[in-house]
Amino acid sequence: MTTLLGIAGSLRRGSYNAALLRALRELAPASVIFEEASIRGIPVYDGDIEAESGLPEPVRALKERIASADGLVLVTPEYNNSLPGPFKNAIDWLSRPPADIPRVFGGRAVALCGATLGMGGTNMAQVAWLPVLRVLGVRPWLGRLLAVPTANKAFDDSGGLVDEKLRERVRAFIAGFAEFAAGPR
């Protein structure tokens, strides 16, 4: 079995990215254990906090979940044509201390996708993540693009996908990534 961990980079109730994360989990192949995690509870990074009391518990717990997964799916919003601050902040915490980066991120398969109200999907945010992923030493999966534009029309009021073509794109995306993540590191 391949274990994937998905994280939505939005804290908003009713988040389209959280809905996309649930759709990925729902449409993942039967050979995949798909778990969800949250960045909720991770404080703004402060080196003084780290020096005085170490890593906050939500950071330590999420690091262990990432380290135990075969692959990581980052479901990113796009804010002002770039990556969202709260999500980047979480990754900054997760990369502490730097000596732990290889254990948590090194060689780990990572996929990017996202949903936004805009017409461009989350293409700009996904590109903005690439330098961060390079520094972390992950194995980025670039096999398929999944950037959902006009997300308010892609999901119903309960967060379910309404378009069958998008549903098939999500299914193909997660199946392709699962195959990549199951491969050699």
Image (cartoon, grey):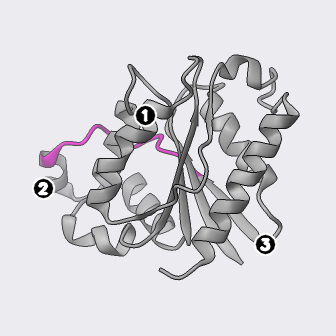
Residue at 58% from the left image edge and 70% from the top image edge: 181
Q: Dot 2 lies on which element?
A: helix
- Badges 3 and 1: C-beta atoms under 8 Å apart? no
Would residue 164 appear left or right of 115 to someone viewing this image? right
Q: Is residue 36 above or below residue 183?
A: above
Q: Position of residue 174 (x, y in %)?
A: 69, 55
Would residue 176 appear left or right of 45 to someone viewing this image? right
Q: Is residue 143 above or below residue 16?
A: below
Q: Answer few, some or many: residues within 10 Å of disc 2's Cα (few below 14, many 20 plus, some between 14 and 19).
A: few
Q: Which residue is mark 2?
A: 51
The magenta stretch spans residue 44: yes
Main SS class of the magenta portion in the image: loop
Residue at 21% from the left image edge and 64% from the top image edge: 97
Q: Which residue is mark 3?
A: 31
Q: Answer few, some or many: residues within 10 Å of disc 3's Cα (few below 14, many 20 plus, some between 14 and 19).
A: few
Q: CA distance from mark 2 to mark 1?
A: 31 Å
Residue 95 in sight in this render: no
Q: Position of residue 103 (x, y in %)?
A: 35, 75
- Badges 2 and 3: C-beta atoms under 8 Å apart? no
Q: Position of residue 114 (x, y in %)?
A: 57, 36
| Front one among 172 and 27 | 172
